[in-house]
Image: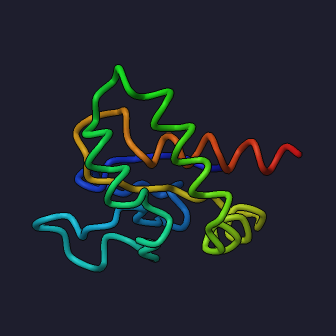
Amino acid sequence: MIKVKRIYDSAGKDDGVRILVDKLWPRGISKDKVDVWLKDVAPSEKLRKWYNHDPNKWEEFKRKYFEELEKNPKVEVLLQLTKKDTNVTLVYASKSPYNNAFALKEYLEKLLTK
């Protein structure tokens, strides 16, 4: 199962493998709060700056981000982790629920149902 959680929230027993999916390391967070940091699956800097967590751009952001992910070999690492019999939690720093972690979860779930 793939879950999404803000990195500043407490880790739960059912989080499983915690994967930070942001390009930048969050302020004030120690390295032991995540198991894996896959910054290469984060949106490009150009896309991130264009989007700027604007809910009005959410659908267009997802479309553009999914195009980036289609060309990203690191997605295979995530798929392998999600195919195991374990929970995976994508963690992020943003205060906004309109962020790459939620979009990435949607993208991975579509790939896993094919």
Residue that protrudes farthest toward the right in the picture? 114
Q: How many marks?
A: 0
Q: Position of residue 12 (x, y in %)?
A: 42, 54
User: Which is nearer the eye, 76 or 12?
Assistant: 76
Instruction: Give the residue at x 58% y 46%.
Output: 105
**Quick one: which residue is furthest to the top in this view?**
56
* Location of residue 13 in the rendering, given as x and y in whole percent from the top left corner: 47, 58
The image quadrant that residue 35 belongs to is: bottom left
Picture layout, residue 77 above or below residue 109: below
Left or right, residue 15 beside residue 112? left
Q: Nearer the viewer, residue 50 or 31?
A: 50
**Residue 63: x and y, percent?**
57, 37
Is 79 displayed left or right of 20 in the figure?
Answer: right
Image quadrant assignment for residue 77: bottom right
User: In the image, residue 87 lies at what x, y percent?
Assistant: 62, 58
Colouring rule applied to residues: rainbow
Identify whether 17 is placed above or below 60: below
Residue beneath the point at 62% across and 40% down: 106
Asked if 77 appears above or below 110 in the picture, the reply is below
Which residue corresponds to the image point at 52% horizontal and 48% vertical from the top-left? Answer: 65
Q: Is residue 87 left or right of residue 90?
A: right
Q: Nearer the viewer, residue 103 or 27?
A: 103
